[in-house]
Image (spheres, rainbow, N blue to C red):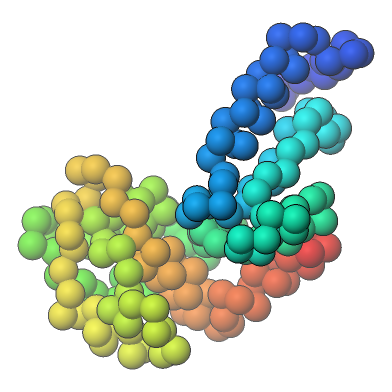
Amino acid sequence: MPPATYTVSLPKPTPKRITEVFEKIEAALSAAVDKNSSLPAISMNVFYQDEILWSGHFGSKVYQQPEMKPNGSTVYRIGSVTKVFAVLLMFKLYEEGKIASIDDPLSKYAPDFTIKNPYTNDNITLREIASQMSGLPREAPCLYDCNTTSAEQLALLKNRSLVLPPWVEPSYSNLGYGLLGRLLTENLLNQTFESWTKENILKPSEW
């Protein structure tokens, strides 16, 4: 039998010890955002059982225009949250039996992928990439001008090397998640990562 689950409702009004935490969060976020900050605006909600316990919006939506305050309808760039989508893809393919093990090397499912590993004779695995422990370089060879195909990127990667041995220490890699998302969808599903994300995450979430 599955373990029992329990739902506990918070007392009303919200207990003082919780509101004091919210006050500390508000002070910290307010201090982090100012007109000279590299963080121009931030919004945060704290939920409990689908109820918003606290909501805060700080900074300005437009540089040096403090009157342009963010609010509950402000749309932010999703940024690296999309890395979670690549991991969800990996586990979905594992659940469907298209991936035998997340400890398989990426090259098992994308035979054209190869990168020099001066540290070990092993190929980097799906788990290592998803855990930011693969030792892959931070960026793709094209850096920020990546209007290229996967085949073109893979050809460039053959001349690149890992920057760290796998599992030595976390090494942030945008490249790793790009490989995970693009190569798995293209090789196992014959579609793009963008189309898979729309079908399986954005549309069901009504985004």
- In the figure, residue 145 lies in which quadrant? bottom left
Question: Residue 206's spot in the image, x, y percent?
Answer: 83, 63
Q: Is residue 51 above or below residue 66?
A: above
Q: Is residue 47 above or below residue 137?
A: above
Question: Residue 47's spot in the image, x, y percent?
Answer: 77, 33
Query: Which residue is depicted at the point 69% across and 22% down?
Result: 23
Query: Which residue is depicted at the point 32% across and 69% down?
Result: 139
Judge from the rendering whether residue 165 lies leftward or rightward of residue 101; answer left or right.
left
Q: Is residue 177 above or below residue 158?
A: above
Q: Quadrant of the N terminus?
A: top right
- Tell me, yes or no, if residue 86 can be seen here: yes
Q: Quadrant of the C terminus?
A: bottom right
- In the figure, residue 57 lies in which quadrant? top right
* Residue 191 or residue 174, whichever sits in front: 174
Question: Residue 15's spot in the image, x, y percent?
Answer: 80, 10
Judge from the rendering whether residue 150 lies leftward or rightward of residue 188; answer left or right.
left
- In the figure, residue 197 lies in which quadrant? bottom right
